[in-house]
Amino acid sequence: MPLVQGGAALFPIIFFQYIGSMKFLHTGDLHLGKTFYERSLIQDQQHLLEQLTQELTSDSANPYQALVIAGDVYDRAVPSPEAVELFGSFLTSLRQTVPQLHIVIISGNHDSPSRLAFASQLLKHQNIHIATSSQDMTNPIIIDHVALYPLAFMNPNFLGDGQTHQQQMAQSAITQILDYHQTHHPQLAKVLVAHLFTQGGTSCDSERVFVGTAELVEGSLLSRFDYVALGHLHRCQNPGGTNIWYSGSPLAYSFSETGNENCFLQVELQPGRQAAVTRIPVTPLHPVHRLEGSFEEFYRDQEGRYSQYRDSYLEISSTDATLKENPMDLLRSRYPLLLSYRQDRAVANSSSGNMEERRQLIQQVGESNLPTAAIFEAFMKDIYQQLPPDFPEELELFNQILEETR
């Protein structure tokens, strides 16, 4: 099956006689180098990339022809050395294992376009196509009967015309892409790879979003493509049309993503047919779970109900009405990957009780309108949940200041 890469320089190319399918794997939002509650996820991400490589090499009879990474390769504009080394090793291994595979990468809003584009001109000769600028969007990667158009994340003035809103820039960019396709490759199927927030998509806590609706792009702009491979939203979803897909992040990066179906998307395109999309599940090294119950339930766990979560990243929401001191230190012997312990109910009860206590104390002061030591003590309890060890010294100082103001 011949693979052809190129753009306008290779026109004209005729593909009318091709009757097979084009198969590629869609993923994105890898966020390599991310930390989760200050814990490095490099090992988790290495485990993820090993699964990605395994999937790409799993079917020799019907091999993948491309890997599409729809932005946010890294978690930061200046990625950690460990993250860069991890991605470099992944690309090297993949290139050696499946040298015929096209790898299409666009920059996301977490990536630095200039850093991600390093050596891109050299890498394209290895079928590794890195798109970070507006010039790349009308230089499609052509594979059999399909033209893939890479549209990197559109920072303000992405098109060089002063536009700053995502909707305006997306409309201009997609119009240019469709006009180019109609002029140069009307006989080919067209795939858009983009990193944006389309209307109807569902977001999670770990995504970096803008204020209000400034970032939203109308899904109708994308309807004329045979398939749209999107990145940015971390939940796998299909908003606004059967041909528009977010692969979602292959790992959960916040506790709000608990329950998400983390996966890669296998996409097969045949001329004249709707894209066939199959979810390929990802097995994380450490699953992410959010649990709820009393402290004693988790600490005693006499029936072993929670033993299955020992190797999971955990957030526990306490149902206790009173605050527990140092709960995470006590629970980590059982749950070494406990990252968050929420005592929202106890904090709310404590705050309500302290407010009522202060109200009664203020009423007792009467018309003097002067603070009292009792009010000061209630205030300190409210701030620190319990009186600090040096409270007697602070109280003595407070009383001295109070006497001086009388």
Image (cartoon, rainbow, N blue to C red):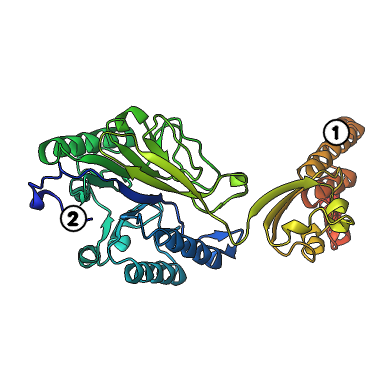
User: Considering depth in this image, is 7 or 197 the residue closer to the camera?
Assistant: 7
Q: Are marks 1 and 2 in contact (CB under 8 Å)?
A: no
- Check the picture and name the quadrant holding the N terminus: bottom left
Where does label 1 land, which residue? 359
Q: Is residue 168 above or below residue 389?
A: above
Asked if residue 13 lies left or right of residue 161, the reply is left
Vertical order, 392 against 146 (above or below): below
For label 2, the residue is 4
* Real-space CA distance between mark 1 and mark 2, rounded to the nearest whole angstrom: 77 Å
**Horizontal arrangement in the rendering, residue 309 relative to residue 111 (left or right):** right
- Residue at far top of view: 220
Give whichever of 375, 308 is nearer the camera.
308
Mark 1 residue type: Arg
Q: Position of residue 209 (x, y in %)?
A: 46, 42
Q: Is residue 215 visible?
A: no
Give residue 11's position: percent from left, percent from top.
8, 48
Q: Residues within 10 Å of mark 1 (few under 14, many from 20)?
A: few
Residue type, numbered disc 2:
Val
The x, y position of residue 24, in whole percent, is 34, 51
User: x%, y% of residue 216?
Assistant: 39, 33
Residue 358 falls in which quadrant of the image? top right
Where does the C terminus fall, quadrant-wise? top right
- Secondary structure at numbered mark 1: helix
